[in-house]
Amino acid sequence: MTPRDVVFPPGRQALYERNRYSPAIRANGLLFVSGQVGSREDGSPEPELEAQVRRAFDNLNAILQAAGCTFDDVIDVTVFMVDPQAIFERVWSVVPEYWGAAPHPTLTAVGVTWLYGFQFEIKVIAKLPEPAAA
């Protein structure tokens, strides 16, 4: 078995170890990022929806940065929302702060009934930067 090439954002490794998953894995020129929620440093959710969405993007961006990427490198996005019919417009009012200019990544949005106390989660696949030529 090939060892996993795990990417950890600064200061959150204990949180991922406690919950037994990797924040992101590099493989075949791609970065596969686990779903990110609006969790504070201690793992608790931001109580207000828009702040939770911003924190989820900030947590995502910390992982992307640790891998040498930005959101511009993201090619595929999956978002999960509890009760999307009620919160979609509020969530999508925050997205432009992070999304960047067109062309945008692909998107799949999924309505769910439970996200461990959160209302929004985002997971992505990004293209890793090409290694510098020697």
Image (cartoon, grey):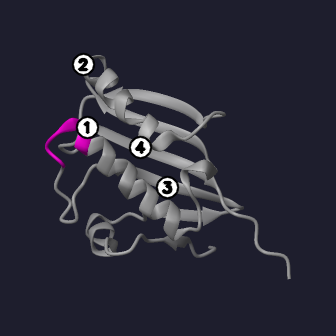
Q: What residue lies at 62% left-to-right and 73% top-to-bottom?
A: 1
Query: Mark 1 sits on what residue?
Result: 50
Place of residue 109 in the rendered image (x, y in percent of width and height, measured from the top left): 45, 28
Which sits earlier in the primary sequence, circle 4 or circle 1?
1
Q: What residue lies at 25% left-to-right and 29% top-to-bottom?
A: 113
Q: Is residue 115 visible?
A: no
Which sits earlier in the primary sequence, circle 1 or circle 2?
1
Count of labels in the image? 4
Query: Mark 4 sits on what residue?
Result: 122
The mark found on residue 33 in the picture is 3
Q: Amino acid at mark 4?
A: Ile
Between the C-alphas of marks 4 and 2, the distance is: 18 Å
Q: Amino acid at mark 2?
A: Ala
Q: Are marks 4 and 3 in contact (CB under 8 Å)?
A: no
Left or right relative to 34: residue 115: left
Which sits earlier in the primary sequence, circle 2 or circle 3?
3
Q: What element does badge 4 sit on? A: strand
Residue at the extreme left: 47
Q: What element does badge 2 sit on? A: helix
Is residue 109 a member of the stretch shown in magenta?
no
Mark 4 or 1: in front is 1
Which sits earlier in the primary sequence, circle 1 or circle 3?
3
Highlighted range, magenta: 46-51
Place of residue 29 in the rendered image (x, y in percent of width and height, measured from the top left): 71, 61
